[in-house]
Amino acid sequence: IKIITSCSSINHQGQEFKALVFEFMPNGNLDSWLHQPSQDPTTNNTLSLTQRFDIAIDIVDAVEYLHNYCQPLVIHCDLKPSNILLAEDMSARVGDFGISRILQENTSEGMQSSYGSIGIRGSVGYVAPEYGEGSAASTAGDIYSLGILLLEMFTGRSPTEGTFGDSLGLHKFVEDALPDRTLEIADPTMWLHSGQHNNTTSIRIQELLVSVLSLGISCSKQHPRDRALTSDATAKMHAIRDAYLKFENRILSEVGWQQGES
């Protein structure tokens, strides 16, 4: 997310006031779209499959920039839906760098060490397991959070919801369902945005969901060394989204041809 400017002034109580001014995000955060308090989900308050793929691309691109192109390199340390903000066109921005860490130079991707003025923290359900054991912040820690975030985006299930006991987290819940029960665990609100699917379409959608959920599983492995690297995760997510867009365009072309015939 872009910082527009900063300001320093005196508030109405005579106290010094300092603030960063960010670009306005009129569609709020991703969490509010995935977990609507309303009991009546509609196309106006839920996300389509296409929107989820587009948002996922924005997120992985932002993470790759932080890890591989930003100078100095940055570890976010708190990737989660409430820190993903949505612009007017529903494009996503990664925000809240309050506990981010700046990486030391001359380190390799995956297990870089870091420094910063704030102790390592994170959010329950998204924080990498090794952080609880005192490990330093690493790009692998962000990838773990990214993996959980992807699983949540396409299942609609929060990693902290009460149905997950100590032995069954979101990672294992999804892993146990792949590939045969993929459509069962997919967020049903996605289908509000599409019509009835024939068997061929359903099979292809299931294949694409298996791919993105498998990526989420790969990113959220227990051990950092087993997780996908940032560049690999980004390339894989782009390949999945491109395959989906190609499939979607073919379906739209077929529908247009059928309407023209009728």
Image (tube, rainbow, N blue to C red):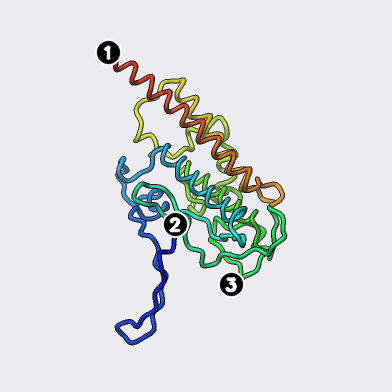
Going from N to C along the chain, the mark reached first, 3 or 1, is: 3
Residue 41's image quarter? top left
Residue bearing the label numbered 1: 262
The answer to whether 87 is drawn above or below residue 121 in the figure is: above
Going from N to C along the chain, the mark reached first, 3 or 2, is: 2
Q: CA distance from mark 1 to mark 2?
A: 46 Å
- The answer to whether the residues at label 3 and label 2 have Cβ atoms under 8 Å apart is no
Q: Quadrant of the N terminus?
A: bottom left
- The answer to whether the residues at label 3 and label 1 have Cβ atoms under 8 Å apart is no
Disc 1: CA contacts within 10 A as few (<14), some (14-19) or many (>=20): few
Q: Position of residue 122 (x, y in %)?
A: 56, 63
The structure residue drawn at horizontal position 61% and vertical position 62%, both measured from the top left corner, is: 72
**Which amino acid lies under the numbered mark 2 shown in the image of this protein?**
Ser
Residue farthest along the bottom direction in this orientation: 14
Q: Secondary structure at mark 2?
A: helix
Q: CA distance from mark 3 to mark 2?
A: 20 Å
The answer to whether 73 is drawn above or below residue 262 in the figure is: below
Disc 2: CA contacts within 10 A as few (<14), some (14-19) or many (>=20): some
**155 or 244, nearer to the observer:** 244
Q: CA distance from mark 3 to mark 1?
A: 65 Å
Q: Position of residue 226 (x, y in %)?
A: 70, 47
Q: Quadrant of the C terminus?
A: top left
Residue farthest along the left direction in this orientation: 262
**Residue 118: numbered disc:** 3
| Viewer-nearest of discs 1 and 2 | 1
User: Is residue 11 toward the left or the right of residue 229 in the image?
Assistant: left
Q: Secondary structure at mark 3?
A: loop
Residue bearing the label numbered 2: 82
The structure residue drawn at horizontal position 38% and vertical position 34%, both measured from the top left corner, is: 191
**122 or 183, nearer to the observer:** 122
**Residue 108: numbered disc:** none
The answer to whether 92 is drawn above or below residue 137 in the figure is: above
